[in-house]
């Protein structure tokens, strides 16, 4: 990484709207992101969007602690998180905004590294960062760096994915191993040493989604199981669709190191956060095609069919249950409160 | 304001992705914002956008301290700031995202009030909040509440505004009095008492911009002079266009209370932040039409023509000068560093 940034730490003046702010924008942000829209230097980025008539928009703020961890940093999360959220609508993700909240005194070389990672991840995802904002707060006003991204894409005609679309008989797929991100952060934060380093799975999944949608055009919905893990995603789907769901525990891909860490820490891996996984619900007759497309896509090699959608029994409320390897079942609830603060 | 929120303060669990997060979303955000796109409950909001083929996008994070001040609160700023930034492109502003970073322990009724203000301001501006995100950080990880908004609008065919478009002979307008926001925050923060309360000017100016653009279709550019004030805006225009600019100090509208406060505090009012003012550069022959349109628009009653664009003298670099009431001139520079941290 070669760069020449005039200031070695972030100073309050970098958020001033004056000459110092121009300097951090020129030296750190424009240098890395460099889209024509940003270089134009106006308050809004103006960009083309094919005329499908519908857009998808999503946003996430990232406050992960620590900012650097095995498998990535807050910059990779900030791009992947929003790209994946927009992509769940079936949209072709095109543009990102990014807003930085920086703590006075944050090392400029770390910021540069984060920004460089954002640029690389945006390039990998095929999206452009077209507008941004920088605020600086005094020491103690934030913990290093917080990043917000918002993303926009165009939704192709005829695509209308929603968590409310699940129907009894549908099949549930996941694009790979669960729990990697949450356990990677937790290990790093608490200085836990497991036999092998567990890496965050943070990855942009927009191309994987496009491939699945092409192979299984009647896909009901996608969602990336971030905070709250698979448990939150499936409970949200079940409630929105008014159905029950059943997961075969043995079918859920989990790395042995993650499984061991969860047992040690007392976590249910189905409630642990992921940042590079996608859950899909598809009609049964397209399940094999969806699975093949996932496995053929980058980041999807461990994809699996993990369960099914069931009708609600009369009088029952929407719920998710897990069928264990022993043949017993248990209810998979959403987390009540906080398991791992500042996981993303 | 009537509401029933289960929890009296923000807790870490409200950012968990689990049941407590669902509760704060349902009780605080959906209740106030309630757009169909949000109520759909998916990770991305999907909305229609007429097929102009071009969008404008902008983002700002808001970290203002204090969060409540005469004339508004951080919620009003968060909506107006992004609406105005998107509108400067000439776009019809349509959709906002919002991302909250909340400090554990923040009073829920204050959050509710901020969110209510955002909903009212969005309604006034005619924009919908279609997607959002909530993160909670531990005590000391933020100062109460930080808000990011991003906004999207469609740019009508033929509209191509840019700070690089200014030409010698053009006329500079401002939509009202300068310095109100910066001095309102500063007074509130430092407990300064002036003879009259100075209120923030935070206001959505998208309708004012549309009116000016309709009356003066060859308008070169708009920009809202926030951090860095008029000085930053005009220096940015001058540099982007490779021109000189001249401001008639006596023509700049300033409230007497703001003028007095600036003199007391040693500020140049032309460098103080505004949150409800628009600078426009228009060709001379459309200046009167632009001025009339501004004055007829809401928030534009004190609009004025304040200066002109001049050719660069040979060998000179782009600069802005102020002609004082005494006939002398001075250079109006961008602020170097920070004048008023966390002004927005």
Image (cartoon, coloured by chain):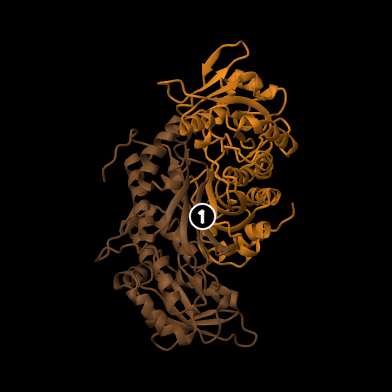
Chain colours: A brown, B orange
| Side (left or right) of A193 relative to B324 | left
Q: Can residue A268 be seen?
A: no
B193 or B333: nearer the viewer? B333
Q: Which residue is mark 1?
A: B135
B46 or A265: nearer the viewer? B46
> What is the residue that sits farthest to the left in this orientation?
A195
| Side (left or right) of A125 relative to B265 | left
Q: Residues within 10 Å of mark 1 (few under 14, many from 20)?
A: many
In percent of width and height, residue B293 lies at 71, 37
> What is the residue that sits farthest to the front in this orientation?
B285
B298 in relation to A194, above or below: above
Q: Residue at x 54, y 27 (%)?
A: B168
B196 in relation to A158, above or below: above
Q: Residue at x 49, y 69 (%)?
A: A90
| Side (left or right) of A187 relative to B163 | left
Instruction: Determine the chain carrying the residue at label 1.
Output: B
């Amino acid at each position: 990484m070669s760069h020449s940034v005039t200031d070695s730490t972030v100073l309050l003046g970098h958020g001033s709207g004056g000459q110092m702010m121009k300097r951090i924008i020129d030296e750190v942000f424009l240098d890395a992101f460099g889209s024509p829209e940003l270089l134009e230097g106006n308050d809004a980025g103006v960009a083309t969007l094919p005329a499908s008539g519908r857009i998808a928009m999503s946003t996430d703020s990232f406050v992960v602690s620590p900012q650097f961890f095995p498998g990535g940093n807050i910059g990779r999360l900030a791009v992947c998180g929003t790209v994946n959220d927009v992509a769940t609508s079936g949209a072709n993700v095109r543009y990102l905004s990014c807003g930085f909240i920086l703590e006075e005194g944050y090392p400029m070389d770390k910021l540069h590294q984060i920004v460089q990672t954002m640029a690389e991840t945006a390039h990998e995802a095929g999206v452009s960062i077209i507008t941004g904002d920088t605020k600086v707060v005094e020491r103690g006003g934030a913990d290093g760096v917080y990043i917000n991204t918002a993303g926009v894409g165009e939704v192709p005609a005829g695509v209308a994915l929603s968590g409310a679309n699940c129907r009894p008989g549908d099949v549930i797929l996941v694009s790979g191993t669960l729990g990697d991100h949450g356990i990677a952060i937790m290990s790093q934060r608490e200085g836990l040493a497991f036999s092998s380093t567990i890496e965050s799975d943070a990855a942009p999944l927009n191309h994987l989604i496009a491939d699945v949608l092409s192979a299984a055009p009647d896909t009901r919905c996608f969602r990336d199981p971030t905070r709250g893990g698979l448990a939150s995603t499936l409970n949200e789907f079940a409630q929105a669709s008014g159905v029950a769901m059943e997961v075969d525990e043995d079918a859920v891909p989990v790395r042995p190191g993650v499984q061991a860490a969860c047992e040690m820490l007392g976590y249910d891996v189905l409630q642990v956060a992921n940042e590079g996984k996608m859950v899909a619900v598809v009609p049964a007759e397209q399940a094999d095609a969806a699975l093949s497309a996932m496995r053929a896509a980058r980041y999807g090699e461990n994809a699996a069919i993990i369960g099914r959608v069931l009708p609600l029994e009369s009088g029952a409320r929407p719920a998710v249950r897990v069928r264990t390897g022993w043949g017993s079942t248990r209810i998979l609830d959403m987390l009540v409160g906080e398991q791992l603060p500042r996981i993303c």
